[in-house]
Amino acid sequence: MPVIDVYAAAGTFVDKNKLAQDLANAVLKWEGVPSTDLFKKNTAAFVHELPSDAISNAAGDNNYVRVQVLTPVNVLNREKQVGVVRELTDIVAAAAGDRTLANRTWVLITESPDGGWGINGQAFTNADIVAPPVRSWEIRKERRVLEKDPRSSSALRRWYECLASRGTLNRRSHD
């Protein structure tokens, strides 16, 4: 689940919310993940406006934009890297209303190590992110088993072991 940060001089973009949403959707597309609420709600872009004197190249120019994309390791092959850099650059230039900004937009792709991404206090591996969620009827079935044997924690343990054995135990599946 990617996170995108955009750094630019204040006033570069009129509609920062639309820019953030367009960038997030573009990265999701290039990652090739399903268009589900799980991915849409956990992919975000942040637009950071800096004072113009806080940005400079070696020549003293301050009209640059930096886009930093943090994505899970091995999600973007070379073709996808090239595609996402091109599309994000085009989105930034269009959002600024300045096609020449493409020449001054840096896009940096950083891969988070497996298990190095988290939300809600849980670090996720790539396998956790793509694991199929437990269907609600499966949870109800396992809870009925638990309710029949509430004498000890062994019933609860068996419920969790059942979910874990199917690779579906994670916070998303039972919160």
Image (cartoon, rainbow, N blue to C red):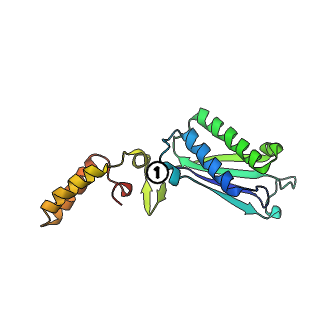
**Amino acid type, mark 1:** Leu
Task: Classify residue 156 by image quadrant.
Answer: bottom left
Identify which residue is drawn at 18% across, 57% down: 144
> Is disc 1 surrounded by few (<14), some (14 to 19) or many (20+) residues within 10 Å?
few
| Position above or below: 116 against 121 | above
* Image label count: 1
Q: In this view, does 125 lie to the left or right of 90?
A: left
| x and y, in percent, of residue 23 in the image | 64, 48
| Position above or below: 89 against 41 | above
Identify which residue is drawn at 51% across, 44% down: 73
Q: In this view, does 122 lie to the left or right of 52?
A: left
| x and y, in percent, of residue 154 in the image | 16, 61
| x and y, in percent, of residue 104 in the image | 79, 46
Quarter of the image with the C terminus in it:
bottom left
| x and y, in percent, of residue 87 in the image | 68, 40
* One can see residue 85 in this view: yes
Tag 1 residue: 38
Identify which residue is drawn at 68% across, 44% down: 88
| Position above or below: 17 against 106 | below
Residue sitting nearer the eye, 117 or 130: 130
Residue occupying the far top of the picture: 79
Q: What element carries label 1?
A: helix
Q: In this view, does 56 lie to the left or right of 115?
A: right
* One can see residue 42 in this view: no
